[in-house]
Amino acid sequence: MVVSTAKQLDSTYQLWKRFTYPSPNGPTDAIAVPKLVGDQLNSTYSVIIEMALVHVWSILFGIVLYLYMRRRGMDVSKLSPLAPTIWNKRADLVDLIRETVTFSATNWRSPAVPLFLLLVLVAWVGQTATGILVPPHILLGNAAPVNPEAIYVPDSSNEGLVSSATLFPLEVPRFIRALGSTAVDEELRQKVNVSAANSVGQTSDGQDILRIDYSYRATGVDFGLQRFPDLTLNVAGSCITDYGWFIFTRLTISDNVAVAVDYYDVFGLVETVSLFDGREPVARFYLGNFTQGTLATSNATWAAVVSSVNRTSFSPGTDPWYLTGPALESATGAQYAVRTARPVLSCWQDDVWSYQGHNSTIDALTSNALPGLELSDSLQIVLNSILGSPMIEAVGQHLQASALQSTLTASAQVFDAEVSSVHNDLERLVQAAYVATVNCLTDLTLYPTGAERQLRNIARGPSGQIEDGVAEFVVWSPDVTAVSTVVVIIIPTVFLGAWLVAIVLLYWTPVKAVTALDSNVLQQRLKSDESHETVETSATIPQSGTSGTQ
């Protein structure tokens, strides 16, 4: 999951609710809590683990010392001086190691002492590692079950001009968020594959024809689905710089300046690009048809027409989209301008959904097409409305002037043609498309308030209630933490079990003999011995005095 740059409101998720956390290792039973509570639980459980291990050492040391005492006839006076130290320092292994190291040189002659020290050292390392490695398993991640009432899925089925004009500004923010994530997430580059721009030929006048392939995959975990982490969307696409879409160039006079207007045939429509589109390079994106791909209707065609003609640069460009020639006139003094008849980026994209070895399209995410997949009908409708066509085309269409990497190099009327390339533009779009894809569900809670008054929310049924099964996903927020219910239960259970075993062992079995090594018991015995010696001495003195007088 790529974390969105937008903050989730408290009203978009549910706290203190049991849910299924999406994990690559399978669905995990969890409870969503505030992040502060999660941090406190993590600290508390570190202490509980340490206390549980103290009881474990009490059990192990107790059994070992009991067997050792039996060999010495249960006579404490015949035990090694190290035995009381082992027993009384069992709660602090570091102190036990220190006491053992400073043990008298005479006792170090026994090979058992270095061996014991090694075992204690291993136990201390294990205890420390357990305290570090186990508590993080309590905290699964920054996710919580979505609040069904916060879900909004705009109706995009109406293709009328009014509906399209209403829908467009509602959708733009999520694509801007996706684009923002591409600049800061280095891990993202490893999840998206974009090949180098490979030459597959040249035009009759020597211009390069380039091909660029791209691919990425998104799993149920990435989508935040509470179930079905193995559901996978496999996206594979390819683009080529196609010069055959260009029709002709017509010169238009504007303010006594000749402006070139290029005409293209795009999926049967005549489109024009020119300097009238803006001073910076821009691109327009078009959706074509669905054709045979890996599956019958899994392949979709799309295209991007760049409007870079006549844009000026201080540096020469050699890329097909930004190929420059001498600038005839330039108010900025730039020596180069992009030539006419730039190629269209003609692309296809194959979207295949897979689950447990079976493949299907977005139109059939059913148990019949994908056995074992039990997505609700309402959630299938939601996914189809968002991912029913190539996401990259929607990204480019909504980003408009911000879609191209080359735009970032533009200043007023000039851009840097030398560093601009169709490859960099496409790579940026693919990365943004990946982010928009994996965030498609969590973005459903980020539409502006009042959006339902503009366009119908297809997540709601005829009664106005959220359809069953739509809310089977989580949202991600740094303010929440998903806590593993299994680990939360197991750790106290282990502690309680170790404590009960230690109590029974040391109070109701023969092993309780080792309690004679307790420091307070030894002190009481020492006082008793001293008191006994005092009594004997006092009794002896009068006898000596009597015999002297006689």
Image (tube, grey):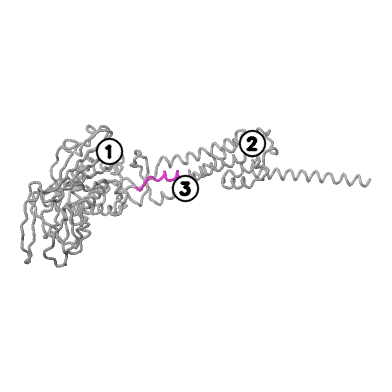
Residue 519: percent from left, percent from top:
65, 44
Residue 213: quarter of image = top left
Going from N to C along the chain, the mark reached first, 3 or 1, is 3
The circle on residue 160 is none
Amino acid at dot 2: Ala
Q: How many marks?
A: 3
Q: Give the CA separation, mark 3 to mark 1.
A: 36 Å
The Cα–Cα distance between marks 2 and 3, rounded to whole angstroms, is 33 Å
In terms of secondary structure, where does tag 3 sit?
Answer: helix
Looking at the rendered structure, the kind of residue marked 3 is Thr
User: From where the camera sits, is residue 383 visible?
Assistant: yes
Q: Nearer the viewer, residue 451 or 207?
A: 207
Q: Are marks 2 and 3 in contact (CB under 8 Å)?
A: no
Q: Toward the viewer: 333 or 173?
A: 333
Residue drawn 67% across the image and 34% down it:
74
Q: Residue 225 in the image: state x and y as whole percent.
A: 29, 42
> For the magenta stretch, what is the residue range?
130-142
Q: Amino acid at mark 1?
A: Leu
The residue that disc 3 covers is: 44
| Residue 462 appears in the rendering | no
Select label 3 or label 1 by which is in front. 1
Residue under label 2, please give it: 513
Which of the marked residues, 1 or 2, is nearer the chain's N terminus? 1
Q: Nearer the viewer, mark 1 or mark 2?
A: 1
Q: Position of residue 155 (x, y in %)?
A: 17, 47
Give the class, few, some or many, for how many residues have Cα within 10 Å of label 3's Cα (few <14, many ≥20). few
Secondary element under disc 1, as helix, strand or loop, is: loop
- Is residue 137 magenta-colored? yes
Between disc 2 and disc 3, whose residue precedes? 3
Q: On the picture, is 173 further left or further right than 113?
A: left
Q: Name the residue that disc number 1 marks.
A: 231
